[in-house]
Image (spheres, rainbow, N blue to C red):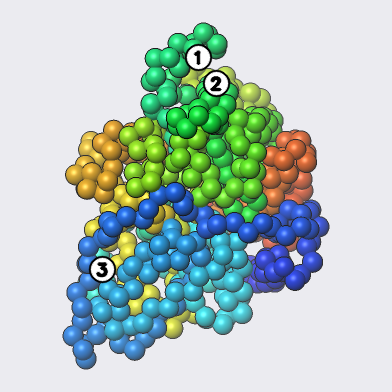
Amino acid sequence: MKLFAPLILIAMILLAACSPAEPTLPISTPLLLTPTPTPRPTMPPAAASVVDVGNVVPPLVATPCTPGHCLFAGQTVSVIVNDIGGATGPITGPLHEIRSEFEAATGAHLVIIEKPLDEHFAYLITDLTTGAGQYDASIAGAWWLGDLVSQDFIISYDQYYGDPRFPQWDINDVLPGPRSLLEYDGRKYMVANDHDGQVMYYRRDLLTDPGHRAAFEQQYGYPLAVPQTWAQFRDVAEYFDGKDLNGDGQPDDGLTMHLAVGEQGMFHFISFSAPFVIGPHNPNLYWFDPDTMKPLLDSPGHVRALGTMVDLVKFGPKEMLDWNLGQSWDHFLRGEAALTFTFGDLGALAQQEGSLVKGKIGTAPLPGTMEYYNTAAGRWEQTDTPNKVGNTSGGSWAGVISRFADAPEATYYLLALLATRQKSLIYAARGWDGVDPGRYSHYLPPAGTANIEDYLAAGWNEQDVRDYTSAYFENFTNPLQIPYLRIPGTFGYLTALDIHLGEAARGQLSPAEALRETVLDFEELTDRLGRDTQAEIYRASLQLGQPNKN
C-alpha cells in the first residue's frame, strides 16, 4: 500500500512549521515542530562551543585516479545533511573533510546541501514524493527508514557492498544493536556511520571525594556511588545541586538536560523510560499494541517515567528548558553539573581542549528501576536487581541512496569511504564530528579490537576512555533493548511525543495529560496512514508472528 498522499501532507506541514511567515497550527497537530505560536529563539548549533575542534584528522584511504581512467568522471553527487556547524560541525563536518579525497579518487564532484535539523526530513520527503531528484543521498536518521523503505524511496546497496571498485568496510564489525538499524526487511540500506545510544555521565572526581561521600551517606543513609537506579540518580542530583562543582565560587547544578522542543529530547525520554516499561517479562511492548496499533504511551510505566523525569528538572538550570544538545553539553564540560545522560559525543568532547572535566568524567550504562510495568500483563513486576535496558536511541545518522539518484554508484563510493575502518576509528575517537562508537573495532579488548594508543593519540585520558568504551559495549550488548521505532510515520509520531514532553517539562500539562495527548496524536496519524498496514509493519519490525484474533 502506497502512502504518498499522507507523506506529502507531512512534508507540507513540516515545511510550513519551519517558515516564520506561515501561521502556526494548533497544538494538537501531531506533525508540528513548534509547540506555541511564538517564534522559537535563535539557538547556536547543536554542538559544544566551549571546546576546540583540535587537529586530529583521519588518514587518506582512497587513491587518486589517473585522468581519463576515473570511475565517475564528470558525475555529481548531491548530499543533504543536517546544518549543525558546517565544515566543523557534527555529522556534516566529515563530508566537508572528505570532499577533496573523494573527488580526486573518482573524478566526481560533491555538493553538500545543509538544512536545519528540524527541516531536513521535510525537504528530503518533498524531493522524494515529487520525484525531483535534487538529492542523491541523505545523511538520514535511522528512525526515518520506515517511511523511506515503505515508499521505495531509497535503494539497497546490497549490489555494491563488497564490490572491489568501492572502498571496503565490514558490516559485521558493527555490534548487533546498531547493525540492525542499517538493514530493513533483510536488505542493507544505511551505510554505517554514526552509532547512537545513550549512557550516563557523572563526575568521577565528585563521587569519589571523601568529604562528599561522608556527607551524602549521612544525608541519604547509603554510600555515594555511581547511580544504579533512577531513584539513586535523583538523590545524587539533589545532593550536588547548588554546590560549587568547578571551583569558581559559584553554585552549580545537580544535572543538565536539553529540553528544547524541535531538537532530540524525545530520544532522551525513550531511553529514560525504558526500564519503567521494558523488562524480562515484557521485552517488546513499548510503543503500540501489535494487534490493534493502540498506542501504549499512556501506560502507568510511561506516566511514572515522565513524572520522574519532570521531577529532575528542578535540579538543573532553568535555562535548560530552551537548551539544545550543545548548550547542555557545554554546561557539563564547564564543570557546572554533576550528572547527565546523553549520546556518545559528550564523552569524546570532554577530552578536547577547553574541557574542564577531562580525567574526571565517568561513564556508565543508564540507571534502571526496581520495578517495571508489564504492559502485556497489566501489572507491575518487581525485580531483585536494577532492571536496566540497553538502547540505540538517537538518529544514528548514516547515508542512504535516493531511488532518483543520477549517480548511485558514485554516491555509494562516497558513503563507503566514510564507513572505512581507518576513518571511522578517528571519527569515534574525536568529539566534534558527531560520529559515535558502535563497532568492535571501536572498543578496547577484551570487548573489541581497538588499540588504546589510538585514543591516547586523540587526546583521551586513559581512565575516561576505559569507562566510556566499557559503558557503551555494555549498553549495546544488553539482552534487553528498547525497541527502535522504524515504521511509516515515525517522524510524525516522535514529533508529537517531543511536543508534549515539552509541555510536561514546562508544567503546562501533567505527565499523564501530556502522554494522553501524545496517544491522541498517535491514533490520528495511524488512522491517516492505515491502521492495518501500520500493524503489519510494526509486527514485522518486532519479529512477531500473526496477530491475535481473539
What residue is disc 1 on? Answer: 216
Nearer to us of marks 3 and 2 is: 2
Q: Are marks 1 and 2 in contact (CB under 8 Å)?
A: yes
Whole-angstrom CA distance, mark 3 to mark 2, is: 51 Å
Q: Is residue 233 visible?
A: no
Q: Within 10 Å of the Cα at label 3, are there few (<14), some (14-19), or many (20+) other Cα atoms?
A: some
Look at the picture and state if 535 lies above or below 464. below
Name the amino acid type tagged 3: Pro
- The picture places residue 216, in percent across and down from the top left corner, at 50, 14
Of the numbered discs 3 and 1, the one sitting upstream in the chain is 3
The residue positioned 79% from the left and 61% from the top of the image is 25
Give the secondary structure at mark 3: loop
| Mark 3 vs 1: CB contact within 8 A | no
Camera sees residue 122:
yes
- 3 above or below 74? above
The circle on residue 167 is 3
**Which of the two labelled residues, at mark 3 and mark 2, occupies the earlier sequence position?**
3
Q: Mark 2 falls on what kind of element?
A: helix
Residue 239: give its label: 2
In the image as oriented, which residue stretches furthest toward the front? Answer: 249
What residue is rendered at 33% in x and 67% in y? 97
